[in-house]
Amino acid sequence: MKLVELLLGQPLATEDEKAERIGAAKGIPIFGLDALSSAAYGPEAALTILIPLGIAGAAYIVPISLSIIILLGIVYFSYRQTIMAYPQGGGSYTVASENLGEWAGLLAAASLMVDYVLTAAVGISAGVGALVSAVPSLQKYTLPICLGILVVLTLVNLRGVQETGAIFLVPTYLFISCMSIAIVIGLVKALAAGGHPIPVAALPKVRGAPEAVSAWLLLRAFSSGCTAMTGVEAVSNGVMAFREPAAREARKALTIIIGILGLMLAGIAFLARAYSIAATPPGEQGYESVLSQLIRAVAGPGVFYWVSIGSILVVLALSANTAFADFPRLSRAIAQNGFLPHSLTLRGRRLVFSQGVYALAVLAGGLLILFGGITDRLIPLYAVGAFMAFTLSQAGMVMHWKKAGGPGAGKNMFVNGLGATATAATTGVVLIAKFTEGAWITMLLIPGLILLMRSVKRHYVQVAQQIHADKPINAKDLAPPLVVLPLETWNIVSEKALRFAWTISPDIRAVHVECEEETDSLCQQWGEFVETPARHAGLPIPPLVILKSPYRFVIRPIVDYVLNLEKENPERQIAVLVPQLVENHWYYALLHNNRSRVLKALLLLRGDQRITLVNIPWHLAD
C-alpha cells in the first residue's frame, strides 16, 4: 500500500472533485499537448512524402501548410460553437448520438477511440524520434524508450488532473517559448537575407535525383500534413474538467491552443522553404527530424539547440497525455449508454477513470510494439478517425441548431455546416491518399469496434431482461438449504465451516474424496470430534460422505456430487460451503493447493440458480 501511495498519491474524496478542476492555463498542457506537439510531426509527415522531389519539395510545404491552417480555422470556429452548446462536454460521440442517432454516435465513438490510441502511440514515438535525431546512438533502443515513457505517462495520469497539469506546465510552455524564439530568429535572418538565409550549421545532404511533381503526390503530402490537426477536439470533450464558468474557460484554452498551433505551422513552413529543409527517411541511418534541422540551421548546435530539442522530446512524448485525458472520459460516456463495460464509468482513487487509463496504456503499448516505435509507420493509420469524428460532430451540430432554432441559429448552422463539409472532404482525401499505406487497417478497426460495442450493449440488454423483477418478492415455500461441506481433513477451518452450517440448516452433508491415510484419519476422528459433541448438544449429526476417486481426482467428484444432489432434490436450494485459507502475504498462496478456487469456478460454470456458494475464510496470522 505504501508503494501504491508513493506512485499514485493519497486517495481523494468524492467531494474533492470540484477542487480538481482546472483553468485555461493548465488546460493547455492537458488538452492541448497533442495539437501543439503535432507541429513537430505534421509538417515532417508532409515533407516525408515529398522526399522524391528532393530540395524542391520544400517549396510546396508553404501552400500545403496554408491549406491545413485554413481548415484548422474552420474547425476551430465549429468547436467553439460545440463548447457553448454542450457545456457538459460535447465530444463527437455525444453530439452525433443526440442529433444523428445511435449508429452515427457509435461511428464517432469508434473513430475517436482509434484516434486516441494512435495519438498516444504517435506522440510517444515522435518524441523518441526527436531524441534519436539528437543522439543517433540511441536508435537501437527506440522501442524500450517508447515503452518506458508510456509507463511513466500512465502513472502520472493515475495521479489526477491537477497533478498532471502541474507536471506538464513547465515543459509545455518551454516548448512554446523555444519554438517561438527559433521561428522569430529564423524569420529575422530570412528577411535580412532577402528570403535566402545561410544555415548556421550544415544540413543533411538530399539523396538521389529529384522526381517530377504530381497532383497525387501533393494530395498525399496534404493528407499526411493533416495529422497536425489531431487533438483539436480534445477541449470540447473535456469541458467538465474546467472550473466554472467551464464553457468560457474551455473556449479560452481552445483559442490559445489553435492560435499557437497556427502560428507554429506557418512559421515552420516558411522557414523550411527559406532554408531548403527536406525530410530524411525515418528509421534509417542518418535520420534527422525537420525541427532538429530547422533549429540547427537557425541557431546552430549550441545550448539553445539542446534545450529546444529537449523540450520537443518531452512535449512530443507527453502529447500522448491528451489521449490519456480524453480516452477515459469518452469510454465513460460510451459505457454509461451500455456500449462498453460498466467498470469504465467508475472513478479511481484519484478521481480519474482509471480503467480507461489502463485500457489506453495496453492498446497504445501493443501498437508501439507492433510497429517498432517508428512514427512514420504509424502516421498512415492516423487522422482518418480524427477527421471522421470532426465531420460527425459538426454535422450533429447542424442538426442541433436546426432543432434548437432561435436567434443566431442560421449563422451557427452555416459555421458548423462549413466545418462538416470541409472535414468530410478532408476525410475523403486522407482515406484515398493513405488507404494503401495502412489507412485500410483503420477502416477495418472502426467497423469492428462498432460491432463490438453493439454486442456489449446486446449482452447488457439480455442480462437486464433476465434479472428484471416487476412483482413483489415471493415469501412462500421457504426452507433451509441442503448444505454440502467439502472436507479434506479435520482442522480448525473445518470446525468453523461446520459450526456455520448448523446455523443455516439441519440438513448437512460433509463430503470427502477418498485419499488413503487422510480418509482413515478423518473417519476415525469424525465420531469423536463431530458425532458425539453434536449428539450431546442436540444438533443434527451430519453424515460423512466418502467419494471414491480411482484416478485421484479431487475436484471433479465433488462437483459431480453437488450436481447430482441438485437433480435429486428439484425443490431444494443447495448451499456449498467452501473452507478457504486466507494468506497474510500473496506469495504464500504458492505454497497451498488452492483447490477451493477451482471448485468454486467449476460450480459457477456448471451449476444454476439453485446452487449457492459460501466462502468460509480462515485468516492466517503472521
Image (cartoon, rainbow, N blue to C red):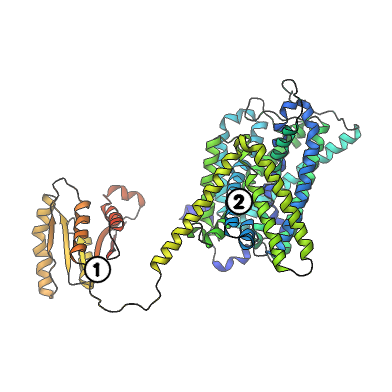
Return the mark for residue 112.
Answer: 2
User: How dense is the environment of label 2, judged by Cα within 10 Å: few (below 14), some, or many (20 and up)?
Assistant: many
Q: Can residue 26 be seen in this view?
A: no
Is the residue 82 above or below the residue 572 in the image?
above
Going by the numbered disc 2, the residue's amino acid type is Leu
Task: Work out whether mark 2 precedes mark 1 in sequence or the reverse, and give the earlier one.
Answer: 2
Is the residue 353 above or below the residue 42 in the image?
below
Q: Is mark 2 on a helix, strand or loop?
A: helix
Q: Is residue 451 visible?
A: yes
What residue would you read off at disc 1?
573
Rendering quarter of residue 193: top right
Q: Where is residue 444 in the image (x, y as percent from the top left)?
A: 55, 43
Asked if residue 486 lies left or right of residue 138, the reply is: left
Q: In which quarter of the image is the N terminus?
A: bottom left
Q: Where is residue 481 in the image (x, y as percent from the top left)?
A: 23, 70
Asked if residue 557 lies left or right of residue 108, the reply is: left
Asked if residue 373 lies left or right of residue 28, the reply is: left
Q: Do the residues labelled 2 and 1 touch (CB within 8 Å)?
A: no
Using the image as rendered, state which of residue 139 and residue 359 is in the foreground. 359
Q: What element carries label 1?
A: loop
Using the image as rendered, state which of residue 300 and residue 68 is in the foreground. 68
Residue at the spot x=48%, y=52% of the render?
3
Q: Quadrant of the C terminus?
A: bottom left
Q: Where is residue 136 in the image (x, y as percent from the top left)?
A: 64, 28
Q: Real-space Cα distance between discs 2 and 1?
A: 48 Å
